[in-house]
Amino acid sequence: MAPNVDPYNREITYLRVSVTDRCNLRCLYCKPVQDLKLLDHASILSYEEILKIIRAATGLGMKKVRLTGGEPLLRRNFVHLAESVCSIPEVEDVSVTTNGLLLEKMARPLFEAGIRRINISLDTLNPLKYAKITRREGFDAVWTSKPPLETDAARKI
């Protein structure tokens, strides 16, 4: 099958998958202060459906997958999904985009599941601006979270 290419003749091998519409922030540019209508659980893709789509996409040349949301770390059993995606042989790279609020707790399990790249969305390095933009406190939780590269085994990867 011919590779997927964009108008600049670059091969497209990257798939972004949103796993939830839930988020623990209410950023000015993203979420309203009130009347936020979230999808019913039955209206979002199950993990089985997400994995089926990813497997089908690998047949179309996708090699990299980014798991995102909303805030993907809020989705129940997200680490299991990440591990399942990492175990698909045709997928060469799996990454996660997060706002970082839950990363201190989730970094080690995500690493153990096979995640080696995490993108933290952080609009500012100023804690006051962060609170204004996100309508939440939490800058310190994001800023001080530590990567799980504390063991010699992890450093060899």
Image (cartoon, rainbow, N blue to C red):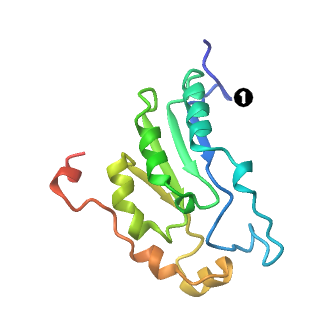
Give the amino acid at mark 1. Pro
Residue 109 visible within the image? yes
**Is 82 positioned to the left or the right of 37 in the image?**
left
Residue 51, relative to residue 135: is it above or below?
above
Residue 76 position within the rendered picture, expressed as x and y whole percent measured from the top left: 53, 58
Given residues 12 and 147, the one toward you in this image is 147
For disc 1, the marked residue is 7
Residue 81, relative to residue 109: is it above or below?
above
Q: Residue at x 41, y 63 (%)?
A: 106
Q: How many marks on residues?
A: 1
Residue 119 position within the rendered picture, expressed as x and y whole percent measured from the top left: 49, 57
Residue 54 position within the rendered picture, expressed as x and y whole percent measured from the top left: 57, 33
Question: Mark 1 packing: few (<14 Cα in 10 Å), some, or many (20+)?
Answer: few
Residue 99, relative to residue 75: is it above or below?
below
**Is 135 positioned to the left or the right of 113 in the image?**
right
Residue 45 position within the rendered picture, expressed as x and y whole percent measured from the top left: 66, 44
Residue 11 visible within the image? no
At mark 1, the secondary structure is loop
- Image quarter of the N terminus: top right
